[in-house]
């Protein structure tokens, strides 16, 4: 069974769950891929249910994400207990229930994701479609639309296009033929002027000092590098530092850490030579949420779990165990 046939079989399982007298809330940890995927799922549900809304568990501060919401006219509520009380059904996109504490206790009817599953945290929902082979969930949601003969409008196509572009790092990581096919389809439907306006909105002037510190603090780890940006207002700064560092030819993987309030956040990126999701789980899951895909991952933990150790030294010491864990080659 090829990818499209499998998608069609998934749709045949999804549609019976939709009732015209029920209200749906699509929940996400919002980034461009999640926002676009949520919009696509909303397009599928909106004519088959009473009401569909989108909600986020995180604060959005990154300029390009805010620009995406503005230029593409996307409404995104902050998740609150009061908001939950107005809906009967809940869907989760671009995440799994164990990925964020705010997902706990929500009875999800639908979970659609492209991050690898973790055996310790099985996903329970009436409908699940989790396919780690996709570089972006926006690719899979484009397949859903195609399989249902739904032509995305200009704004939705632009959102999906941007979701694919950002989650694959402009096709520099975790991309496969399916992502390229979806991108080729969407490029003819998208608003390229709006897309350009969103893409030019990645940085704030106030963030330059954090980027400078991140670049100046580089420590070597074989063909990888570790950077510590110190106290930062948002994890988006760490993501930008990691993405820029991955453009350096000599770096095969990077880890960028920073402190946000009373938590330590670590962003990991690679060119595929190392599995960042497995690395995050192995090193940091005992301290807090950790995991991701082969080319990108994230870990977060309270500073109290470091037992007084300096955050940068803590992360660097953990990363050095990975570097030194490779067995030496046996002489021939």
Image: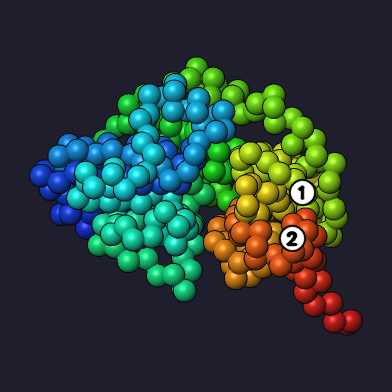
Q: Position of residue 265 (x, y in %)?
A: 64, 52
The reply to whether residue 157 is visible in this rendering is yes
- Which residue is depicted at the point 74% across and 57% down? 311
Name the foreground residue: 267 vs 11.
267
The reply to whether residue 139 is visible in this rendering is no
Name the foreground residue: 272 vs 303.
303
Dot 1 corresponds to which residue?
228
Would you place residue 261 above or below residue 9 in this image? above
- Which residue is depicted at the point 43% across and 50% down? 94
Residue 72: quarter of image: top left
The residue most toward the top is: 193
Find numbered disc 1 in the image and state the secondary structure of the residue it sits on: strand
- Which residue is depicted at the point 61% across and 43% down? 235
Q: Earlier in the sequence, mark 2 or mark 1?
A: 1
Q: Position of residue 142 (x, y in %)?
A: 37, 41
- Which residue is depicted at the point 65% across and 65% down? 305
Dot 2 corresponds to which residue?
315
How many marks can you see? Answer: 2
Image quarter where the N terminus lies is bottom left
Image quarter where the C terminus lies is bottom right
């Amino acid at each position: 069974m090829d990818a499209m046939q499998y998608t069609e079989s998934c749709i045949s399982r999804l549609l019976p769950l939709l009732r015209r007298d029920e209200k749906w809330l699509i929940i996400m940890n919002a980034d461009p891929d999640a926002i676009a995927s949520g919009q696509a799922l909303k397009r599928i549900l909106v004519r088959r249910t009473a009401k569909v809304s989108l909600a986020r568990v995180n604060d959005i501060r990154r300029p390009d994400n805010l620009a995406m919401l503005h230029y593409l006219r996307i409404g995104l509520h902050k998740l609150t207990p009061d908001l939950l009380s107005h809906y009967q059904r809940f869907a989760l996109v671009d995440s799994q229930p164990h990925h964020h504490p705010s997902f706990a206790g929500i009875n999800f009817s639908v979970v659609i994701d492209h991050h690898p599953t973790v055996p310790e945290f099985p996903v329970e929902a009436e409908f699940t479609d989790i396919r780690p082979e996709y570089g972006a969930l926006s690719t899979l949601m484009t397949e859903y639309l195609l399989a249902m003969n739904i032509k995305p409008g200009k704004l939705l196509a632009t959102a999906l296009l941007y979701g694919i572009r950002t989650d694959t790092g402009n096709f520099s990581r975790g991309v496969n033929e399916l992502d390229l096919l979806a991108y080729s389809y969407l490029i003819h439907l998208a608003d390229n002027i709006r897309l350009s306006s969103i893409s030019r909105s990645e940085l704030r002037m106030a963030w330059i000092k954090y980027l400078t510190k991140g670049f100046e603090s580089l420590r070597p780890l074989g063909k990888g590098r570790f950077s510590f940006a110190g106290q930062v207002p948002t994890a988006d700064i760490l993501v930008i530092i990691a993405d820029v560092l991955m453009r350096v030819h000599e770096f095969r993987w990077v880890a960028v850490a920073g402190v946000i309030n009373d938590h330590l956040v670590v962003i990991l990126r690679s060119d595929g030579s190392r599995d960042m999701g497995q690395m995050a789980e192995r090193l940091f899951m005992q301290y807090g949420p950790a995991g991701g895909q082969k080319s990108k991952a994230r870990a977060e933990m309270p500073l109290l779990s470091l037992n007084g150790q300096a955050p940068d030294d803590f992360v660097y010491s953990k990363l050095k165990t990975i570097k030194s864990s490779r067995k030496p080659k046996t002489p021939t």
